Amino acid sequence: MNTSDTPQPLSPELVRSWLQAHPEFFDANPDLLPAAITASGKVLSLEAGQLNTLRQKNEQLSLKLDGMLERIRRNERIHAAFHQIEVQLVTAQNGLELLQCATHDLEQLFGIHRATIALSSRFPALIHLFDAHKIPPELGDRVFTLDHKVLLDTLRDSPHPVIRVGQEGTNRERFFGAASPSIRSEALVPLFAHPESGPEGLIGSYNLGGATPSRFLPSDATDLLRDLADILGLCLSRLQEAEPIQKG
C-alpha cells in the first residue's frame, strides 16, 4: 500500500492558516458559525456585532434625549403662558378686565374647561368689583359669593390647593355654578389678600375645573397655580383699594 495516498491529519495551525487565506469560506457556510455572530440570516463579524449593539444603545439614548428635550420645551411653553397671564392680571384696570384674564383667557390658553372665582361674603368691597361692571354673557357664571365658613371648610383651612376628583366635589355647584355637572376634577386654590397673611387673610378661592378625571390630580405639582393665585389675590386687593364701593 502506498502510504503517500493516505490523507494526513490537519493540525489546528494548518486549518487556521487556510481559513485566514480563504475568509469567503464562511460566506458560503454560515451554518458553521456560532449563533452569537449571525443575525437575520447574514453573517457578521464579531466587530460588526459589537457595532450593532453600540448603535442600538445610541438609538435608545437618542430617544431618551429627545424625550427630555421635549419636556424642557413643554415646560418653557407652560412658563411662558403663565407669564403672559400674570402680566395681564397685573395690568388689569378694573374688575371686568381682571375677570376676563383670570377666567376666559386662562381657559383658552391652557384648555381648562372652567375657571371661576369664589369670594368670601366677609368682603363686600371685593364683590362690588364685579357688581360695578356689566359682565358680558361669555363671562357669566364665573364669580360666586360664598359664606366664609363654607370656604374654610372646603379649603381645609390650608394655604395649599385642594384637588378633588370625581365624586369628591360634593359642593361643586357652589364653585362652578351651572358648569358643575361637566366637571370631573378640580383645583381649588386659596386666595389671600397678601400671600403671607394666612387663614385670617383668606378672601376666596380661584377654581379650575377639568372635564376629565385626569385633568387635575393630587399628585400634580401646584407651585405655578399657587403663584398665579397669589398674584390674583394681590390684584383684587389693589383694585378694591382703587375702586371703593359707590353708595346711593
Image: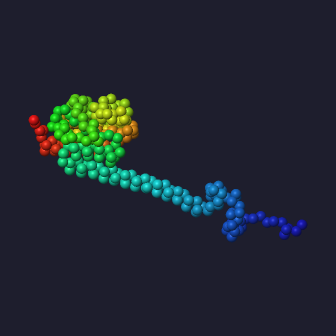
Q: Is residue 18 left or right of residue 221?
A: right
Q: Which x, y percent locates residue 219?
A: 36, 40
Q: Is residue 141 above or below residue 11?
A: above
Does residue 184 appear left or right of residue 232 in this picture?
A: right
Front in this rendered view, residue 144 or 205: 144
The residue positioned 37% from the left and 40% from the top of the image is 215
Residue shown at 69%/67% (left/top)?
24
Quarter of the view holding residue 49:
bottom right
> As rendered, which of 221 and 141 lies closer to the eye?
141
Q: Residue at x 25, y 45 (%)?
A: 100
**Residue at (34, 41) in percent of width and height:** 113
* Quarter occupied by residue 126: top left
Residue 115 horizontal side relative to residue 41, left or right: left
Q: Return the x and y of residue 96 as percentages of the image width and height.
A: 22, 44
Towards the viewer: 59 or 204: 204
Rendering coords of residue 231 (x, y %)? 22, 45
Image quadrant in which the N terminus is located = bottom right
Image coordinates of residue 149 in percent, x first then y, are 22, 29
3 left or right, relative to 181? right
The mark tally for this picture is 0
Q: Is residue 187 visible?
A: yes
* Farthest-out residue, right: 1
Residue, far left: 248
Q: Nearer the viewer, residue 24 or 92?
A: 92
Whether residue 157 appears in this view of the structure is no
Q: In the rendered view, tell whether residue 159 sits above or below residue 8.
A: above
Q: Quadrant of the C terminus?
A: top left
